[in-house]
Image: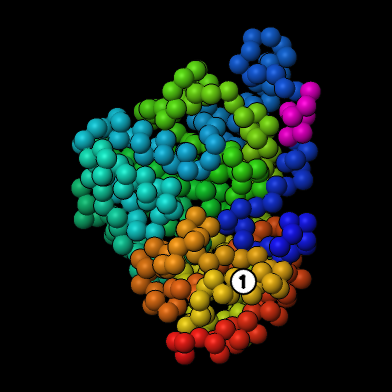
Amino acid sequence: MDGDTEIIYMDNNATTRVAPEVVEAMMPFFGGRYGNPSSIHGFGGTVRRAVERAREQVAALIGARPEEIVFTSSGSESDNMALKGFCREHGGKARIITSAVEHPAVRNTARFLRDGAGAQLTELAVDGCGMLAPDALDAHDIGPGTLVSLMWANNETGVIFPIHEMAQKVKARGGMFHTDAVQAAGKVPINVQKAPVDMLALSGHKLHAPKGVGAAYFRAGTPVTPLIHGGHQESGLRAGTENVPYIIGLGRACELAVERLADENTRVRALRDRLERELLAKCAGAKLNGHPAERLPNTTNISFENIEGEAILLHLDFAGIAASSGSACTTGSLEPSHVMMAMGVPYNCAHSSTRFSLSAYNSDFDVNKVVSAMPGIVDKLRALSPFV
């Protein structure tokens, strides 16, 4: 579909549009304010101050101190920095505990460290709703050489893990706690002063900043080994001249996210609830994937029994609607997502799992269009299905 064509966009967990306010904040740094923030002269100094202002804006979103924020290129880099840095600190004695439904940025990194660096790896099971059991960590040895990495919210189902409780258990036993908060940041309240996490990752393009910028939070006193060595940038933790325009954009996006948090959890949630309720009622064989309550306010994942998810997406695309099957990071695979498999979703449902993820830019009109289109698509594809 032509990128200029107006579409009903419900794939915001894959990426978001860049907010106009973010574009406006970035533009001067593509033009007249091009100085290097590491330069001693005043021209560079003004840029440095803008970067530090952005650091304050990011910190405010998660309740951190500005000096605890490191700018990166993405959530994936932030995750890699945390996991690989921890293993460098602890060598062959490192132990990683994570879940079976983590984003590939954590899942594949942890498996790489197991296979290539000798780290011990445990992947915790989830139940049929994609939720961890309250006692999931109780039977495992956790100490100074253990890193527990659990996502704040799942990218496919929106299920929110009990991060506060899990982090408290880990810290009480002397372990370190990391969370991939890429999907949660800007959608639900996050306060690292209340949740004792040591490390956290977030990504700009999930909250209306550009692709190619992210941030990592490291609680003061957390030992950090750089992933990228070189110059002194980012307090010596991430070498390379800062991507100033994108950092400014991330800062402004985080500021907007704070302002819009109430809207995300009221108006956007209500749109999601209506979309979900009507699809489940009007589409035969529709089933919700994920916890009915403990979810992000913008996300619903629904299976349409005995239909191929790719066929659903193609028909939605023809109707001018953008959604997702599984996660964008696994698109192209013919196998159901590892998240659906870990939840025990039957194969004939897992293959049809379709994610609708909304944002502040969605409206009742968008929901009406999807609700109008989906029943016909489901009926047509089910009539053609060899599984029926």
Q: Would you say the magenta stretch is mainly helix, strand or loop?
A: helix
Residue at image x 50%, y 86%?
Answer: 385
Write down the residue under mark 1. 314
229 is higher (above) or lower (below) than 123: above
Expressed as whole percent of the image width and height from the top left, the position of residue 172 reads: 29, 43
Query: On the picture, is 318 further left or further right than 151?
Result: right
Please tell me whether mark 1 sits on a helix, a strand or a loop.
helix
Q: What's the amino acid at mark 1?
A: Leu
Q: In the image, what residue occupies the spot 23% across and 45% down?
A: 120
Q: Is residue 225 above or below residue 346?
A: above
In the depicted structure, whether residue 128 falls above or below residue 385: above
Q: Quadrant of residue 380?
A: bottom right
At horizontal 53% and vertical 57% (from top left) the residue drawn is 328
- Residue 253, percent across and down? 67, 43
Residue lying at 27% horizontally and 40% vertically, measured from the top left? 116
Q: Quadrant of residue 360?
A: bottom right
Q: Which residues are magenta?
A: 26-32
Residue 163 makes an appearance in the image: no
> Which of these two is toward me, 321 or 170?
321
Q: Position of residue 320 (x, y in %)?
A: 72, 69
